[in-house]
């Protein structure tokens, strides 16, 4: 018996738009919707500030975009680590305290122990690794829930930070401040923009084109579903325009400014961690353990080691975020890091992570963090107080997670799960491999997993 393949329908189909940001055969409506929400928020605040301030809005200006990156880069860095923790089914409440604890040690090392600032940065990363190893040990090998371990860490390291610093503000040298307040340097050419910033944008555009071409070739080779060519072209053109316009705004700001160094650090981390979570065995193990620990363990995944590394990685990124904040503030203070863990967790859930674990992406978390950042920034530009900002942030988080939970309770597919599931794939159980953003069921022989 022979079967004939159904020819692909040509022309415009609305569902093809859902593949716009899914790399062809992957639907990421959740991220698409969040990205749309981010654009709506930015445009809305631009209009509102235009009405309030007269001829020009205050949101889409070079100075404000630079301010957003400088003010919220450390939260976005925390979100990168937090999404891995939440995918694993854990939570980390200690990141703000760990960031502050690292910041005070680094500040004292430079002002009192005469450490050069590069060595102080290495010291800070080492402190973060040690703290993460300590907490990872309790989670992975003792079996204490991460919520309890990191709650204890939040209390302990907050107290340790204030004890070491004696509740005082400790300044840091100018060389160290570059990681929090620096910009791409100027090149002595008579051009009305910052050349390195625009070169960086051109490199980003070239990478977008290369990655889309590579993705389509891989999908063709594997015989998987591909988006129509017009979808890929539209996606690359839209993203390229956004990158170039944003870069132009950074490059043409007030004299002495350009793309901030904290933004460079954040960009590098996004690229590295997106690759790690999407294209490495370890990244697949994170999703596998988060989706179904029992099934992953029976498949040979060393889940304890994955737990340990993810918790340690989170503290290293918290240490880096703390150092960037101290460098931007030009001093370490007793109230550093307060509430950071809540902003990081909110960014991850708004960015599409599932409460039960197993689902989430680095890019989604960054978009979620930018939603929170522009909400804070826009409300501040409109003169709203911290009380209004806090209430709105809470409502946004509740709605983002509540919609997904409500759909599950109604017997409908989880929006998050549906929007991140690969279309048209079937796996032979004997040869199944773990994939990101997929929830796995335990083997039939296991009667105790509760699946």
Image (cartoon, rainbow, N blue to C red):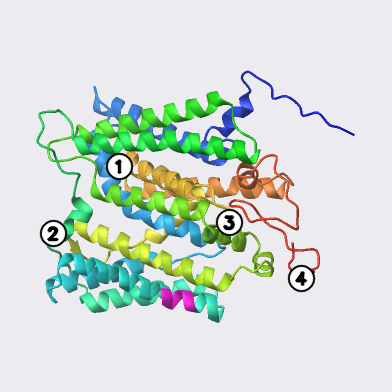
**For this view, does 431 lie left or right of residue 2?**
left
**For this view, does 293 lie left or right of residue 62?**
right
Q: Is residue 23 visible?
A: no
Identify the secondary structure beneath mark 1: helix
**For this view, does 166 lie left or right of residue 354?**
left
User: Marks 4 and 1, how far apart in space?
Assistant: 51 Å
Name the disc covering residue 175, or none: 2
Name the disc covering residue 194, or none: none
Q: For the C terminus, give its image quadrant.
A: bottom right
User: Marks 1 and 3, how far apart in space?
Assistant: 30 Å
Q: Which residue is mark 4?
A: 448
Q: Which residue is mark 1?
A: 380
Between circles 2 and 4, the one closer to the viewer is 2
Identify the secondary structure beneath mark 2: helix
Q: Earlier in the sequence, mark 2 or mark 3?
A: 2
Q: For the N terminus, give its image quadrant.
A: top right
Quadrant in the picture for residue 320: bottom left
Magenta residues?
Answer: 133-137
- Assess whether mark 3 and mark 2 are in contact (beta carbons under 8 angstroms): no
Measuring from the top left, give residue 350's x and y in whole percent. Answer: 50, 47
Asked if residue 171 is positioned above or below residue 435 in the image, the reply reads: below
Identify the secondary structure beneath mark 3: loop
Identity of the residue drawn at 24% across and 45% down? 260
Q: Earlier in the sequence, mark 4 or mark 3?
A: 3
Identity of the residue drawn at 46% across and 51% down? 275
Nearest the viewer among 418 and 446 is 446
Q: Which residue is mark 3?
A: 355
Label 2 environment density (alpha carbons within 10 Å; few <14, some 14–19, many ≥20): few
User: Marks 2 and 4, how far apart in space?
Assistant: 57 Å
User: Marks 2 and 3, how far apart in space?
Assistant: 41 Å
Quadrant in the picture for residue 155: bottom left
């Amino acid at each position: 018996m022979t079967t004939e393949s159904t020819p692909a329908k040509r022309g415009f189909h609305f569902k093809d738009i859902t593949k716009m940001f899914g790399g062809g055969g992957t639907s990421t409506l959740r991220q698409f919707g969040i990205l749309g929400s981010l654009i709506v928020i930015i445009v809305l605040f631009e209009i509102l500030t235009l009405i309030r301030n007269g001829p020009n809005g205050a949101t889409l200006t070079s100075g404000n975009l630079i301010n957003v990156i400088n003010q919220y880069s450390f939260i976005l860095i925390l979100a990168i680590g937090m999404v891995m923790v939440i995918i694993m089914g854990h939570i980390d409440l200690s990141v703000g305290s760990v960031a502050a604890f690292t910041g005070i040690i680094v500040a004292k090392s430079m002002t009192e122990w005469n450490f050069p600032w590069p060595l102080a940065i290495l010291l800070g990363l080492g402190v973060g690794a040690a703290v993460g190893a300590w907490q990872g040990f309790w989670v992975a090998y003792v079996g204490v829930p991460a919520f309890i371990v990191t709650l204890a860490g939040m209390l302990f390291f907050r107290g340790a930070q204030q004890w070491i610093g004696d509740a005082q503000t400790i300044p840091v040298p100018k060389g160290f401040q570059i990681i929090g307040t620096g910009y791409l340097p100027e090149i002595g050419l008579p051009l009305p923009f910052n050349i390195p910033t625009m070169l960086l944008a051109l490199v980003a555009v070239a990478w977008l084109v290369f990655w889309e071409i590579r993705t389509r070739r891989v999908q063709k080779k594997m015989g998987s579903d591909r988006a129509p060519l017009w979808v890929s072209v539209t996606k690359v053109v839209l993203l390229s325009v956004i990158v170039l316009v944003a870069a132009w705004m950074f490059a043409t700001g007030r004299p002495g400014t350009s793309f901030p160094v904290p933004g460079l650090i954040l960009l590098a981390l996004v690229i590295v961690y997106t690759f790690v979570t999407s294209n490495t065995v370890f990244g697949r193990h994170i999703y596998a353990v988060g989706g179904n620990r029992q099934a992953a363990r029976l498949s040979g995944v060393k889940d304890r080691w994955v737990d340990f590394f993810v918790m340690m990685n989170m503290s290293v990124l918290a240490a880096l975020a703390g150092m960037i904040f101290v460098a931007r503030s030009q001093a370490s203070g007793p109230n550093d890091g307060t509430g950071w863990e809540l902003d990081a967790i909110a960014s991850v859930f708004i960015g599409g992570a599932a409460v039960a674990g197993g689902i989430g992406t680095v890019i989604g978390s960054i978009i979620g963090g930018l939603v929170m950042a522009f909400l804070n920034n826009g409300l501040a530009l409109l003169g709203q107080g911290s009380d209004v900002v806090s209430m709105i942030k809470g409502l946004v988080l509740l709605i983002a997670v509540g919609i997904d939970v409500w759909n599950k309770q109604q017997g409908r597919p989880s929006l998050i799960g549906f929007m991140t599931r690969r279309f048209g794939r079937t796996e032979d159980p004997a040869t199944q491999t773990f994939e990101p953003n997929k929830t796995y069921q335990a083997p039939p022989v296991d009667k105790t997993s509760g699946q």
